[in-house]
Structures are given as structure tokens and as C-alpha cells.
Image (cartoon, rainbow, N blue to C red):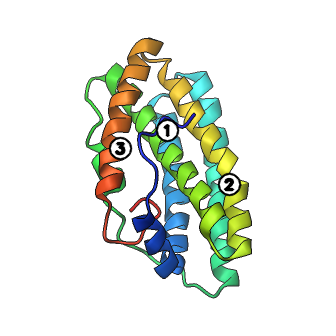
Amino acid sequence: MLHLKSETGQRWLNQVEKHTDTILIDHAHCEKKAAGTALNLMFAYIENEDLCREMTSIVNEELEHFQMVRDILNERDIEFRRLKPSSYGGKLHELIRSGESQKAVDRLLVAGLIEARSCERFGQLRKHLPDAQLRDFYDSLFESEARHHAVYVRLAKHYAPEREVMSRLDELATAEAAIITQGDELPRMHS
């Protein structure tokens, strides 16, 4: 279960239809950022062997996905370039509490919600894209994003009791739904 409180609407699918190349470029950036997030968590919580093992796996997988997207961009002669990110990630990160055990829980849950939303969006792409290669590509990524979400939620339980973690996940998922519903004018993976 992805713990999301909303589903992607037609507004985003319209953005994808009109700006598929930009969505692909942004997707590559998202994979790179996901690897960076996992690496940062490993550095922040180096004493947690389980977390470090899982983050090592996630870093490697996200970088592999990054290269897969880059390969698709190259095949299609789409120039990989910097893009202004959507406001989605920044708004979610503003919700992270201070105080180390709360901060650890929130950092992990926010990362998990981003993975959940990516998974949900990949599910939409594998159903709605007219391009068979891209449908197959997003289908191939779907399960790993769901697994990453589950790993982040499980690891948050190292820092607080399950009841507290699940309550906080519910709060953050409600906020995430509001952020994603508000959307972003920029065509991005999380707009």
C-alpha cells in the first residue's frame, strides 16, 4: 500500500501529453535526487546498520534508473539539461520537524511519500502513454518505487513506535495530497 491520499488527475496527464520530453528530463533529475536523498540519509544515520544497507541498495538502484532515463533521452536525441524543479519536494521538506528522532521519522516518511507518488505516477504513465517503449519502461520501474516506499516507512519505525510513525505518515500523506492537488504549472514528474 502506498499510503497516498489522492490520485493523479487529468491535469497532470495533460501536462505529460504536451511535454513528454520535459517530463523525461525531469524524471532523470528525480532519480538523481532520490539517490542523493538515500546517500544523505546514510550519512546522517550511519550508526543504523539496517538503514545503511537499505540506502546502499536504493542509491545503486536510483543511479541505475537515472542512467536508464539518460539512455532513453539519448536514443530520442533529447538534450539532458538543468530544469527548474517543481515546488513539490520543497513543500514536503518544509514539513520535516526538528528534534532528531522526529526529524529522522519525517525525513524517512517524506522520502517514502515521494517514492509512493513516483510509483503512482509511473502506474499512470504505463497505462496512458501512447508510446509503447515508455509504457514498458515505466512498468519496469513501478515495483521498485513501491518497494522503496515500504523500506522508508519500515525504517522510520527504528526511530519511533509504529503507532506514532503511522499517525505521522497519515498527517504527511494528507499534506502531500494537498500539495499534489494544488499542482504546479511546470510540467514535471511531481507537478
**Label 3 residue SS:** helix
Which residue in the protein does label 2 denote?
141
| 166, above or below 52, in the image | above
Q: CA distance from mark 1 to mark 2?
A: 15 Å
Residue projecting furthest to the bottom = 77
**What is the total number of numbered labels drawn onto the structure image?**
3
Looking at the image, which is closer to me, 92 or 45? 92
User: Spatial distance from mark 1 to mark 3, Cα to Cα?
Assistant: 11 Å
Tag 1 residue? 112
At label 3, counting other C-alpha atoms closer than 10 Å, the crowd grade (few under 14, some 14-19, many 20 or more) is many
The amino acid type of the residue labelled 3 equals: Glu
16 relative to 8, above or below:
below
Q: Quadrant of residue 12?
A: bottom left
Query: Residue 185 location in percent, x, y?
Result: 31, 70
Tag 1: Cα neighbours inside 10 Å, few (<14), some, or many (≥20)? many
Residues at discs 1 and 3 in contact (Cβ within 8 Å): no
- Secondary element at tag 2: helix
Farthest residue in the front direction?
10
Secondary element under disc 1, as helix, strand or loop, is helix
Q: Residue at x 49, y 49 (%)?
A: 117
Give above or below for 100 relative to 95. Answer: above
Which dot marks residue 176?
Answer: 3
Residue at (64, 68) in percent of width and height: 69
Q: Residue 187, how many percent across, how many down? A: 40, 72
The mark lying in front, picked from 2 and 3, is 3
Residue 57 is labelled as none
Specify the amino acid type for callout 1.
Gly
